[in-house]
Image (spheres, rainbow, N blue to C red):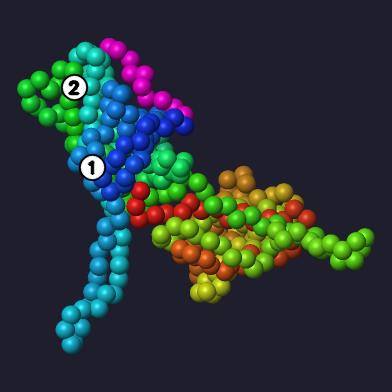
Amino acid sequence: MPLVTAAVVGPETPPPIDLPEVGYASVTYIDPAGNRWPMTDLAADWYTLAEGVSGLGAAPYTLTSDAHPRGGARLRHVQPQPRSIVWPVLVKGADHMVFTANWRALATAFTRTLRLGSDGSRTAGVLEVARPDGTRRTIEVYYSQGWDGQGRTATGITWDSAVLTLWCEDPYWVDSQAVVVHREYGVGADFLVPYPTVSSSQVLGATTVTNPGDVDVWPTWTITGPASLITFTRADTGDAFTLDPSDPDIGHGALLAGEQVTIRTDPVQVRYQDGSNWVAGLDFPDAVLWSLPPGTTDVTFQLDGAGAGSAVDMTFNPKYETA
């Protein structure tokens, strides 16, 4: 059986084509094993059939409303729903055995998203849409159905096509470039000694964070000690959460210089640098691990017991309605 060698591992980007709901873009499928399958290279042995592609636009929503006594209704709740992407693919080969190898390899690349790993979880594949300016947006996908040939005369010998349905549990497109907000402890300096000077602007405290995306994002925080108490507050809502490294259920004590703890807000997870679970140190039930809405938001990073080396890194990937 011929070996399939066209799947590549690396940053290679196929040529762009004109896609419905997207425009001029290059698309790559990344399977759970990390192999990159170019989807828009018309010179390759497989490529996307642009006619028939759908599901790349704005996310689907379910609206809940209440009847209004004077007629009509009032919108009460909006719930984003999983997205389905229809993705037609043409597969070919120089002869029947090459075609068969390509067909089988691509089928495995998509359907392996449904297989359980050694940890009992499934790993999604990723559709990556790259624009000519170098920006990239991705969405995680699971194979749903459609890897079937046409079953017509002459198909299945050296070529055939399949119309896949890919299911996305998160309907939003994610920017591949993360936004990182870094703040560190600034050592005070005498303005006049030895000459007029100011301290670094990268200090802990009030700051403004910009989310350039279309929807709320849930950031990850990495805190570097020293710090005895950690509090993050969103100014517009007053939502806040506090992590106490000295909580009896943790038993660690204040973070020492260079020690790190990472807080994820969705799903909630708190991990010390050795992997131990520190979620008990959050001030539940009062803690609200808040999200960042689109636009600018005033927030406060507060580290009690901060000193030289204390720092906070807030990281998130913007999310968008469309590719």
Q: Position of residue 301 (x, y in %)?
A: 63, 64
x 30%, y 56%: residue = 59
Secondary structure beneath label 1: loop
- The image quarter containing residue 143 is top left
Q: At 26% from the left edge and 45% from the top edge, which residue is drawn?
A: 20
Write the start and end of the magenta stretch as one range: 1-10
- Closer to us: 133 or 194: 133
Q: Residues within 10 Å of mark 1 (few under 14, many from 20)?
A: many
Is residue 147 something one can see in this rendering?
no
Disc 2 on helix, strand or loop? strand
Total numbered labels: 2
In the rendered view, would you say 23 is above or below 255?
above
Q: Which residue is mark 1?
A: 53
Is 25 magenta? The answer is no
- Determine whether, in the image, residue 55 is placed left or right of residue 140: left
Lower position in the chain sequence, tag 1 or tag 2: 1
Q: Quadrant of residue 205?
A: bottom right
The type of residue carrying mark 2 is Trp
Residue 288 numbered tag: none
Front residue of this view, candidates 20 and 193 = 20
Figure check: 127 above or below 154: below
Depth check: give the residue in front, 43 or 179. 43
Query: From the viewer's perspective, is residue 108 above or below residue 169?
Result: above
Residue type indicated by callout 1: Val
In the displayed orientation, state which residue is furthest to the bottom: 70
**Location of residue 58 in the rendering, given as x and y in whole percent from the top left corner:** 30, 55
Characterize the local packing of mark 2: few (<14), some (14-19) or many (20 or more) Cα atoms within 10 angstroms. Answer: many
Which residue lies under the disc numbered 2? 159
Quarter that holds the N terminus: top left
